Image (tube, rainbow, N blue to C red):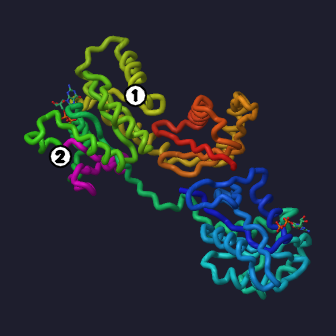
Amino acid sequence: MALPIVAIIGRPNVGKSTLVNRLAGEQTAIVHDEPGVTRDRTYRPAFWRDREFLVVDTGGLVFNDDTEFLPLIRQQALTALSEACAAIFVVDGQSGPIPADEEIAEWLRQQPVPVLLAVNKCESPEQGVIQAAEFWSLGLGEPYPISAIHGSGTGEILDELLNYIPAVEDVPENNEIKVAIVGRPNVGKSSLLNAFVGAERAIVSPISGTTRDSIDTLIERDGKSYRLIDTAGIRKKKHIEYGTEFFSINRAFKAIRRADVVLMVIDALDGVTEQDQKLAGRIIEEGRACVIVVNKWDAVEKDSYTIYDYEKNLEQRLHFTEWADTIFVSAQTGQRVEKILEFVNQAAESHKRRVSTSVINEVLTDAVSWHSPPATRGGRQGKIYYGTQVSTQPPTIALFVNEAKRFNDNYRRYIERQFRQQLGFKGTPIRLLWRSKK
Ligand code: GDP
Ligand code: GDP
């Protein structure tokens, strides 16, 4: 999910850059290199109250003979508008409306984007109201007197702007957590499912999933719904065809893709096998949250070192154990089975978590102070301008840097570790996107 974009439009010298600076503060301009976004506009992150957005300055709208936009600039403004959720049209309150403003207004009225009218350079409150009133004639609704230099009036227009900026929290939330139970044959997936369902008095009837490869079962605990995506049931029917060892890894892959949280079930008696590693790799690739469930713990002869040995084995053979929780259970006796859901809740929460830009940059500033980016042979040093979380599920953080290739794997891992240490994200993979600023 990308941040909403607000386009700043107006003729030259009305104060667009000054306004952008005020909205974005010290944050450096960035250039997106994502598909669909051309490289020639600069975006700057800004926030107002609890909303974050990017502001893009379209450059001054210049006219031919005062009647027509220069084609290139028109194109640029159109592109900016097409991706914007709202536009702020800036005019100069000291000069009053001029024909060029009317041209732009007429053009803006034809665009499908909501437009707010900022009458800039209105330093004096009393006069500002009078200056602003002159711009009603543009037919764009209420003119807001502001002073980009002093910041007066910007709060009012930003409050109005919030009506057009989608709030991240407004994204309809489906509270159901989709949980895929994956693992090799005979690790105890069906037993685990039965343990979940059996523990609940009123058994919810299984409902068919969207594919015929898995059967979904809905359960509820403490007011929360879980959709268990089980890949075992169908396989059982195919015993005759394939024999008990048949293991459709593709079926497991499909279940992983549909899930929020994957329960990666491992047989305590066998430890981690190559097939388990393959599933683990896919969980990371798909960016799913994960809980490692070591089943048949009842069947293991234990002494005080056993857990420690198991954890070590897991650590060596599964590279995500540092962020995924591991739980030792018995589907047969029911031991700790319910506790799995607590880990699922936490993993699902981390997976959906959104961290504000200011917190991310605090972590970055700190990380860089402890350990500055490596200098390359040429002597030039990597520089991180700032970071911002661009999406969730999994949490994805874009880092805007002078040149991405100056940051080696070691340093990238260091930064990722810092995010984990400072922000948690227990149970979910996180992604860092290193973006060069040209
Ligand atoms: P742009 O070309 O639209 O980006 O305009 P700028 O932000 O570069 O500003 C053009 C000129 O207007 C500069 O000299 C600014 O100092 C001045 N200016 C910008 N905002 C204000 C304001 O709120 N009040 C006054 N009095 N001058 C301003
Ligand atoms: P699936 O193929 O992954 O669905 O595995 P099943 O649930 O069918 O279990 C395979 C075998 O392991 C069955 O014989 C189960 O009784 C046994 N099993 C499953 N869970 C446990 C457990 O926690 N402890 C022990 N000792 N056996 C288990």
Determine if residue 392 is in view: yes
Can you name the residue that lies furthest to the left here? 240
Front in this rendered view, residue 345 or 436: 436
Determine if residue 342 is in view: no
Whether residue 418 sits left or right of residue 23 in the image: it is: left
Question: x%, y% of residue 303?
Answer: 32, 11
Going by the numbered disc 1, the residue's amino acid type is Leu
Q: Does the magenta stretch include residue 156?
A: no
Whether residue 424 sits left or right of residue 337 in the image: it is: right
Going by the numbered disc 2, the residue's amino acid type is Ile
User: Which quadrant of the structure image shows residue 98?
Assistant: bottom right
Q: Name the residue under label 2.
A: 234
Front in this rendered view, residue 156 or 105: 105
Q: Do the residues labelled 1 and 2 touch (CB within 8 Å)?
A: no
Whether residue 124 sits left or right of residue 24 in the image: it is: right
Question: x%, y% of residue 302?
Answer: 30, 14
Q: Is mark 1 on a helix, strand or loop?
A: loop
Quadrant of the image where one finds ligand 2:
top left
Label placed on residue 195: none
Residue occupying the point 82% across, 86% down: 99
Q: Image height check: is 313 above or below 22?
A: above
Q: Image height check: is 170 above or below 350?
A: below
Residue occupying the point 30% across, 41% down: 181
- State which region is magenta: 206-233
- Cα distance between the residues tagged 1 and 2: 27 Å
Label placed on residue 318: 1
Q: Does the residue labelled 1 lie within 8 Å of ligand 2?
A: no
Question: x%, y% of residue 135?
Answer: 80, 83
